[in-house]
Image (spheres, helix red, strand yellow):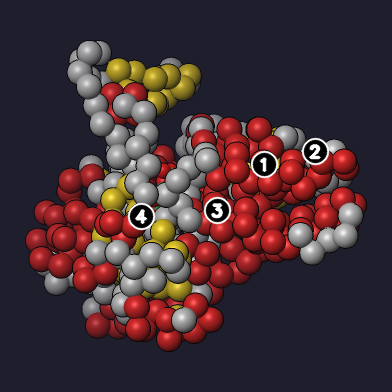
Amino acid sequence: MNVNGKHYRTIWVKEGDEKVVQIIDQRWLPHKFILEDLRTVDEVAAAIKDMHVRGAGLIGATAGLGMYIASIEAPDNEFDSFLKNAGTKLKATRPTAVNLAWAVDRVLAEVAKGNNPAQKRKIAFEIAKKIADEDAEYCKRLGEHGAKLIAEISRKKNGAVVNILTHCNAGWLAFVDYGSAIAPIYEAFNQGIKVHVWVDETRPRNQGASLTAWELGQHGVPHTIIADNTGGHLMQHKMVDIVITGADRVTRCGDAANKIGTYLKAVAAKDNNIPFYIALPSSTFDWNVCDGVKGIPIEERGSEEVKYAQGLYKEEIVTVLLAPKKSPAKNFAFDVTPARLIAGLITERGVVKANEKDIIKLYSEHK
Ligand code: MRU
C-alpha cells in the first residue's frame, strides 16, 4: 500500500542488512510515520506485546521473522534449544490471534528439516519470508472475492454509494499488505465502485480512528469515523448496506474472535437484516476449536488503556487521563461472534458460509 505515494509493506527485511527486520511503528500513527529496526528476538517480542505491530496477519508475519532473527542470534552449540525458547517467548506475547503460534510452529517445523545451524538459518529466512509473502497474496485474493459482494450490492442500488461498516483495523496495517476486512473495499474502490466506509473508532485503543481512517485516507477511500455505539442507529436508518470486519481467530465451526465490540455489531446487523461478514486469510483459522466462546482465549489488557487516551496536542503526542484516577477498569481486548450471526467468511479461496461443513469442504486438508 502507498504512504504519501510510496509503496510500503508493514514489515520487511532491511535492504543491505539482512540481520535487521524493519516495521512501521504503529503506536505513533496517524500523527507520525516512524520506522523501527528490530535486531533481537526480545525486541521482536516487545514490538508484538507493546503493539508497535498489531493485527492477526502482521503479528504472525512478525513472529515468523522474529524466529528468523532468533536463528541469527542462536549460538551454534545450542541452536535448537535457543530457537525453541525464542518460540515460547514469542508465543507468550499475545494469546488471541492464532496466527502467532501458527507462524512460530511453522518455522520450527521447517527448521527441524535442516542438518546444521547454517542450513537451519537459511530455512528460517526462507520460511519467514514465505509466511509474509503468503499473507500479502492471500489478502489480495480474499479482497477480490469480497469485492464481488460489494459489487452485487452496488448493482442492486443502481450504482449508488455502498455503505460499509467496519470495526477495529483490519486493513493493510494489520497484515503484511492489502488487509482482510478492508481488502474487498480497496478492490471495489479500485474497480470504480462507489463506496463509503463507516469507521468505528474502536475503543479503547482507537485502532479504527487512528489506523483504519488513516490508511483509507491514504488510498483516497471516502470514510467517516463514528463513535463505537453509533452503528446500531445507522443500521436502523438504512445507512449501512454491509458490515465487514476482520478476525483474530476463527474456529472450524465459524465462530469468530475479533476486537471487543464486534459481537454487538453482529447482533445489531442481524436485527436489521444487514449481512455481517468476517474476512480472514486461512492462517487465522483455528482448526482445533469449534465453540469459540468456550475455546478461544480472550486477552485481558491493562486497565490504563481504558482510563487513558493518546492524542496530539500542540504537535506533541500526549496521554491524558479520562476517568477518576482511582476507579477500577476492565479491559477485555476481544469478543467472540457466534457463527449464527455471520452471513459468510471471506477467505482467499472464496466466500464460504460460517459452518463446519462448508468450511471443511473448502479446506478439505483439515478434515
Ligand atoms: O490492536 P489489536 O491487535 O488488539 O487489535 C486486533 C485487531 O487488529 C483486530 O481485532 C482486527 O479487527 C482483526 S485482526 C486483522
Secondary structure, mark 1, is: helix
Q: Give me the C-alpha separation between circle 1 and circle 2.
A: 10 Å
Residue 156 seen in render: yes
- Residue 73: image tag: 2
On screen, residue 260 above or below 157: above
Q: Are marks 1 and 2 in contact (CB under 8 Å)?
A: yes
Confirm or deny contact between disc 2 and disc 3 (CB under 8 A): no
**Residue, disc 1:** 86
Lower position in the chain sequence, tag 4 or tag 1 = 1
Residue type indicated by callout 3: Ala
Give the residue at mark 3. 101
Left or right: residue 13 versus residue 263 is right
Q: CA–CA distance between discs 2 and 3? A: 20 Å
Q: Foreground: 117 or 259?
A: 117
The residue lying at 74 percent from left, 43 percent from top is 81
Q: Which mark is residue 64?
A: none
Numbered disc 2: secondary structure: helix
Q: Residues within 10 Å of mark 2 (few under 14, many from 20)?
A: some
